[in-house]
Structure formats: C-alpha cells, structure tokens
Amino acid sequence: MSTITSYWVQKMVHQPLEDLMQEGYNVKKHHFGNSITFSRNVFIPLTNICKDHCTYCTFQRRPGDNGAQIIPEDDILRRVKTAKDAGCTEVLISLGDKSDYFPEVREWLNHRGFRNMLDYVAHVSKRIIEETGLLPHTNAGVMCRHQLAMLKPYNASMGMMLETVSDRLTGPGQVHEHAPDKRPHRRIRMIEEAGKLKIPFTTGLLVGIGETWVERMDTLLEIKRLQETYGHIQEVIIQNFQPKTGMDQLKSNVVSEETMLRLSAIANILFDGTIHIQVPPNLNNNYLSKLIQSGITDWGGVSPVSTDYINPESPWPAIQRLKEVTLQNESHLTERLPVYEDYITPEWIEEPALSAVKELKGRIDHETPKLYT
C-alpha cells in the first residue's frame, strides 16, 4: 500500500463521519454552489447478451437464454420518440461486452447489414441524433480507439464503470474470474483512449463486490490520475451493489449507509471540484438527504419512461421527490444534459452531436428555472 493510499484510507475510515461529511459538503459548495443536477433519460438496453460472466450480474444473458435479446432499430426509435415526448434529453445505450463473440449475434447483425455490434450501435446513435435530436450516451463496455472514434460524432458523452482496480477480484472464485473485460488494465486503457480522443466520460467505483477499503481508495486514486492526465472525466459514480434473489454467496456484501456516505464525501474531497460526484438515488432511497449533506453533486439519469434494467427491483424516485428532498437541504434541482457544460465545445464534441447538444441546452436552460427551484 502506497503512502498516499494509506493517508486517504486512514482519513476515509477513521475520521468521524459527521466531520467527513461536512468537509465533503464544504468542498462541493465551494466549487458547485447549491445546485444538485440530474439528467432526464431513457434507458435502452440494446442487448443483454454478454461474453463476460460476473457473479453479481443479473443483466447478462447468453444466446438462447430466457430473455436474451437484441432490440431492433425501429423499436429503439419508437422508444426514443416516446421519451422525447416525455421531455427526455438523454438516451442511455447500454449493452453487454463483446456480444458479437457469439455466432448467433453475428448472424443477426450480418442479416441486417452490420459487420459487428459496434457498427450497429453507431448506426442507431446516428438515427437517434438525426431523427429525434436526443443525445446518445453509450456504455458498450471495453472498446478500442477506432470504435470510440466511430461513435464520437453521434454521442454527447460516453461511459464505462472502472468498478475496481483490484486484480485480486479476477482470481479463482472471485466475482470477475470469468469476466475478461473486467481486467483492470483493459478498462484503464480504454478510459485513457477516450481521454486521448477528448470524449467527455463517465466512470465510477462499484462498491460491495468483495473489495477492501484499500482497493476502493486505489480505484478512486486511479480515476484521479486519469482525470489529471486527460481532463475528460466529467463525473464519477459511487454505486453500491445490491445482492439480488439467489445471490446467497453475496448477501454479506450489502453496503451500509455509512460506507456510502464516507465514500461520497471522500470522493468530493479527493477530486476537489474537478469531477462531479453522482450516487444513484434509486439504490439509496432511504438517505437521500444525507447524501446531499456528504457533498454529492448529481443524481444521475432519472427516467420517466423506462426502468433501471441493471437494478429493476429498485425504481427511480419521482423527479418531484428529488426536487423536494433537494430543496429541504437548501439546494436546488437543476436539469442537465448527458454532457456537462464545461465540455460543450467543438474541442470535446463533434458534429452532428454538438448541434443537438446546443439546441437541447437552450431548451432546458429556458425551462429549468420554472420547474426545479
């Protein structure tokens, strides 16, 4: 354990919680004022077929499994147009890693004129931009530089959870043993490539999959290094894993409220205003006020039209409730796009995504003061 990791772990674990939360809140208020942001989105699980097998994932399917699917493009566009009518601005496109590893998936794609799954994602993203004006935010797992560059013109931002830098968790009997794309060096390399391409990016820490406090801190420090090098990480998600039915071996991994508050506060202190801190409200619905008091800056994507397909047992709270909780804590709720304002420049976003971003930004800037304050 490095000296710097040791310092932050001691601070994170041993500083009185109330003091740590106050420090995190002070940092947040200094850099971001009294605003808590959210994005109104629609969640499109383009395919749940995935080459990897993480023991904590209920989203992943193999071809032939019950519920395995690839959503046809016309169905996707119908969902997106419904979301547009509901006021959404973000289209969260999520899919399993390397789904076209399977011949059944390649056959489905080839029959429709696509060489691979990322070609299909690029095509769908282009249609969304051109036909609806909404903004794709793609999380397609590990991609190479060429694939990232192919998606960039049609995505306002992209993302992938780093989850952890622990190689230990890829070992025998661990959660990532059968998930080659969860090898930390592969995910770090992709985040670096996104930085070199100047893609506004979301990443984060997954808590409760067997990691230690040292490994949590090392993950946050690696994200800090990536941000200091490339400047492209706009937000970090502190996401708690919640064991699902049938996961008896992971029941002991339930993440406590105190752990989430400590991590939220320490992330704010560590990043010191350079990155927004997001905690999913549907996974932490019982202590939303305390999360604000620990210094979080963002509620993430909240959908009025779709469920959280990764955590379907945890519905998103109504935007009205988030507004009320935020106001109760002397803050105001502000709607944002999937790309934060500092990144809305030609340096970071290419056409046609840039024009769509500017048009939607004008709309929400006009509407937000009337709705959320």
Image (tube, rainbow, N blue to C red):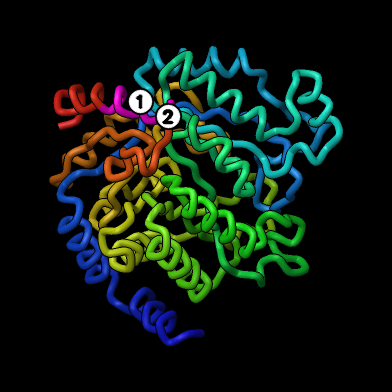
Task: Give the label on residue 355, or none.
Answer: 1
Q: Give the x, y percent position of residue 338.
A: 38, 36
Q: Amino acid at mark 1?
A: Ser
Magenta region: 351-361
The quadrant in which residue 262 appears is: bottom left
As for residue 358 lying within the magenta part, the answer is: yes
Residue 349 lies, with reference to residue 191, above or below; the image says: above
Q: Residue at x 66, y 72 (%)?
A: 168
For the residue pair 287 and 115, the one nearer the viewer reads as 115
Q: Residue at x 20, y 22 (%)?
A: 367
Q: Which residue is mark 2?
A: 351
Left or right placement of residue 303 versus residue 60 in this view: left
Left or right placement of residue 239 versus residue 170 in this view: left
Residue 118 lies, with reference to residue 181, above or below; the image says: above
Left or right placement of residue 24 versus residue 103 in this view: left
Contact between marks 1 and 2 (CB within 8 A): the answer is: yes
Neighbor class of circle 2 (other Cα within 10 Å; few <14, some 14-19, many 20+) is some
Q: Give the x, y percent position of residue 366.
A: 18, 23
Secondary structure of the residue carrying tag 2 is loop
Q: Residue at x 67, y 18 (%)?
A: 72
Residue 283 lies, with reference to residue 316, above or below; the image says: below
Q: Main secondary structure of the magenta part?
A: helix
